[in-house]
Amino acid sequence: MLRKPTFSLLTILCCTTLLQGCVPAAATDADHVEAAFSLPKQFADAQVDDDTKQHAADEDPAVATEGWRAFFTDPKLQALISEALTHNQELHIVEQELAIAQNEVMARRGEYLPKVGVGTGYALEKVGEHTSQGVSDNALGLASVLHNKHAGLQASWEVDIWKRLRNAKKSAYARYLASVEGKKFMVTHLVAEIADTYYELMALDRQMDIVKRYVETLQKAQQVVEYQQEAAHANSLAVKRFSAEVLKNRSLQYALQQQIVVTQNKLNMLVGRFPQDVVRPSDSFLHQKLPTLHAGLPSDMLENRPDIAEAKLDIQAAKLDVRVAKARFYPSLSLDAGAGFEGFESKYFLKSPESVFYNVAANLTAPLVNRMAIEADYRSANNRQLQAIYHYQKVVLDAYVE
């Protein structure tokens, strides 16, 4: 009695092994590419002793996790950053991408759960009199035209044998977390760009003041030379030289004014508003005090930079996508069921148990012929995994250089 179940189990295992052998191999080993990339233990031309390592371990994580208000204490700059975090259009776009990723997680979770629906229908049926069904209907005295009605519940559930649906849900969740880190990086980048533009604008103001004072000094010197020329103590060449120097610095003054307008417009665009004057304390630019930062160790970046965390999560999602694509080569098991009432006469439509119907079915299907689309998706998933690994390496290199 035990031979038949054992034989069936062995048959299933053999078929599964054969199906696994039919999965095409990836052109490049993604795990080997990922393992071949390692981060340096210290920055170039940096002497890292035990005290430095302890200092990095104790202070750098705290510095890296400080809010932007701890770095930028200028009230006017803080007001600009706060307004940008509320009105910047690119940040709003990233927030919508985050919402889309969250909806994708919900959709993948729904695919794994059973699906239950209610349905009703009406069908008009007339069969030929010289068919087997027509002869039977005439013998029973039924009408030549039947009005079939049905209503009931339908349920279906794909049994996730190979974790295809669960891996798809995990992949969507990893991409959602990557979107969260992407938003953090977007905020960091936006704050840094606003601060950089703000200080650049203040530096241009100081440069403009210097050029204005220099032009005034040159004009006074030109008047002195003109008086000397009138007194025959200087010639016209000296006057022309001072006049040319005044005109050259005035042209520099106009160029600086144009650059100030461009920089101010850029700052307004980052804040998310139309061009307008930006209030800034340019006189105190040379007295700005910023906190001291420590480079620390390269490994600290892996824990503190959101763009690296986003790239790592993209790799996790890509790996899960490869598993999802690979599972499509294996058989899929689905369970279908339905129950309700059906009949062709209204007075008997809801009569129980005569009008009650139910059905239960299990379907096991596996791709056998023409699997090119599945194979193409599997290879594309492997390529996207390699792309995510290379992107991670590029992000780490960029962070190391920065």
Image (spheres, rainbow, N blue to C red):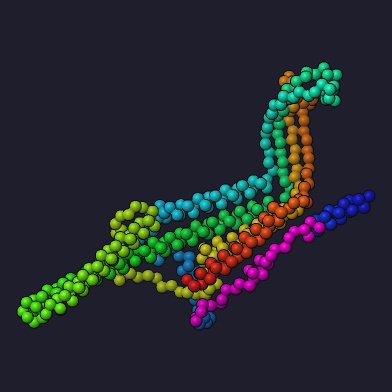
Would residue 365 appear left or right of 179 to someone viewing this image? Answer: right
Determine if residue 269 is in view.
Answer: yes
Tell me how many marks there are: 0
Residue 346's x, y, as percent?
72, 20
Residue 58 is inside the magenta segment: no
In the depicted structure, whether residue 257 falls above or below residue 133: below
Residue at point 68%, 56% (across, down): 376
Q: Locate residue 339, reporting x and y percent.
A: 74, 33
Residue at the top extreme of this rendering:
141
The quarter of the displayed image where residue 225 is located: bottom left
Describe residue 21's horizontal placement relative to residue 246 as left or right.
Answer: right
Measuring from the top left, give residue 318's x and y in whole percent: 63, 59
The vertical placement of 19 against 58, above or below, is above
Residue visible at 64% across and 69% down in the picture: 33
| Percent coordinates x, y for residue 321 in the rendering | 65, 57
Q: Nearer the viewer, residue 136 or 155?
A: 136
Q: Quadrant of residue 151?
A: top right
**Does the rendering let one see residue 164?**
no
Residue at the far right in the pictured view: 1
Q: Magenta residues: mostly which secondary structure? A: loop
Residue drawn at x 69%, y 43% as measured from the top left: 114
The span picked out in magenta is 18-46
